[in-house]
Image (cartoon, helix red, strand yellow):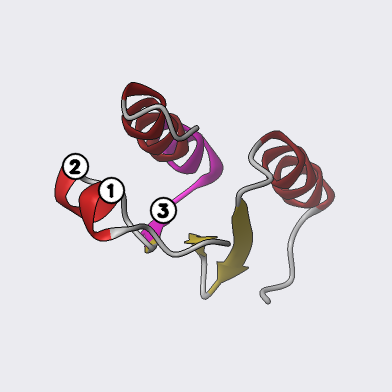
Amino acid sequence: MDDLTPQQQAQLAAIATTYPGWHIVVHHGWWWATKHSPPTAEQKAAGVLPQFARPGPHEMVAALNVQLGILARMGAA
């Protein structure tokens, strides 16, 4: 994991706590999320990603909210 500023460490901890279904790390400046349980074929078809990266914490939160929205619409959140 990258050396993070105290603010980034706090953001990472908050995101990890808020989205317990995902493993969140920062690697080479990119914020990565990996779903703890791989998505089913139906979830993948609906747009659930097993892993994705975003350039910062705000973009990561937005993307995680999209993923949770898909899961919620499927009744799997």
Q: Which residue is mark 2?
A: 46
| Crowd around label 3: few <14 · some 14–19 · many ≥20 (10 Å) | few
Find numbered disc 2 in the image and state the secondary structure of the residue it sits on: helix
Who is closer to the viewer here, 40 or 34?
40
Q: Are marks 2 and 1 in contact (CB under 8 Å)?
A: yes
Q: Residue under circle 3? A: 55
Name the residue: 71% across, 49% down.
Answer: 12
Q: Residue furthest left?
A: 45
> Looking at the image, is mark 3 or mark 1 nearer the viewer?
1
Residue nearer the viewer, 16 or 30? 16
The CA span between labels 3 and 2 is 24 Å
As drawn, is 37 to the left or to the right of 11? left
Could you tell which of marks 3 and 1 lies nearer the N-terminus?
1
> Quick check: is 70 in the magenta stretch?
no
In x, y percent, where is residue 56?
A: 49, 47
Kindly identify the amino acid type of the residue bearing the numbered disc 1: Gln
Question: Which one is in front, 18 or 2?
Answer: 18
Residue 58's x, y, as percent? 50, 34
Q: Is residue 19 above or below residue 41?
A: above
Part of the protein shown in magenta: 52-62
- Asked if the residue under mark 1 is in contact with the one under mark 3, i.e. CB atoms within 8 Å, the reply is no
- Tell me the amino acid under the disc marked 3: Pro
Pointer 1 local density, CA inside 10 Å: few below 14, some 14–19, many at least 20: some
Q: Is residue 49 left or right of residue 64?
A: left
Which numbered circle lies on residue 43? 1
Above or below 62: residue 48: below
Could you tell which of marks 3 and 2 lies nearer the N-terminus?
2
Camera-nearest residue between 41 and 60: 41
Residue 61 on the magenta segment: yes
